Image (cartoon, helix red, strand yellow):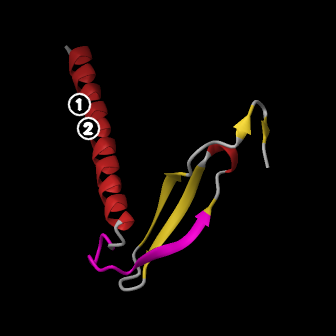
């Protein structure tokens, strides 16, 4: 009896964690969509700008930090940089 209850408890906890992760990703995507339009997700003003950008090398993914000049909102996003520069084991420069 306790084995079944333990199994149900683990399934409920795991399901909740999966749901929370997908909800987080949905919220993050919504914020990025607003930022791509130049709108701050917090104050809804067109005051968002790029604060920092770090290249990902050959992976093509950039880590971009955005900052609102109105309400000091900051957030970082991993954004694909386009085509990869790698061929084989070495990077083209």
Which quadrant: the N terminus? top left
Q: Which residue is mark 2?
A: 16
Horizontally, residue 79 falls left or right of residue 32, namely: right
Do residues under tags 1 and 2 come within 8 Å of each other at their CB atoms?
yes
25 drawn magenta = no
Q: Which residue is nearer to you in this view: 21 or 51?
A: 51
**In magenta segment, residue 44:** yes
Image height of 66 relative to 33, above or below: below
Give left or right: position of 59 versus 51.
right
Task: Residue 11 in the image: state x and y as whole percent.
Answer: 26, 26
**Region rendered in magenta:** 40-53
Residue at 38% over, 64% down: 36
- Tell whether 55 sits left or right of 22: right
Q: Which residue is mark 1?
A: 12
Q: CA distance from mark 1 to mark 2?
A: 6 Å
**Which residue is most to the bottom?**
70
Quadrant of residue 13 within the rendered picture: top left
């Amino acid at each position: 009896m306790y084995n079944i209850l333990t199994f149900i408890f683990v399934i409920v906890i795991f399901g909740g964690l999966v749901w929370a992760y997908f909800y987080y990703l949905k919220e993050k995507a919504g914020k990025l969509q607003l930022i791509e339009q130049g709108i701050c997700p917090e104050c809804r003003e067109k005051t968002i700008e790029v604060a920092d950008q770090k290249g990902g090398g050959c992976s093509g993914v950039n880590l971009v930090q955005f900052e609102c000049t109105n309400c000091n909102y900051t957030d970082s996003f991993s954004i694909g940089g386009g085509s990869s520069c790698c061929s084989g084991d070495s990077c083209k420069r």
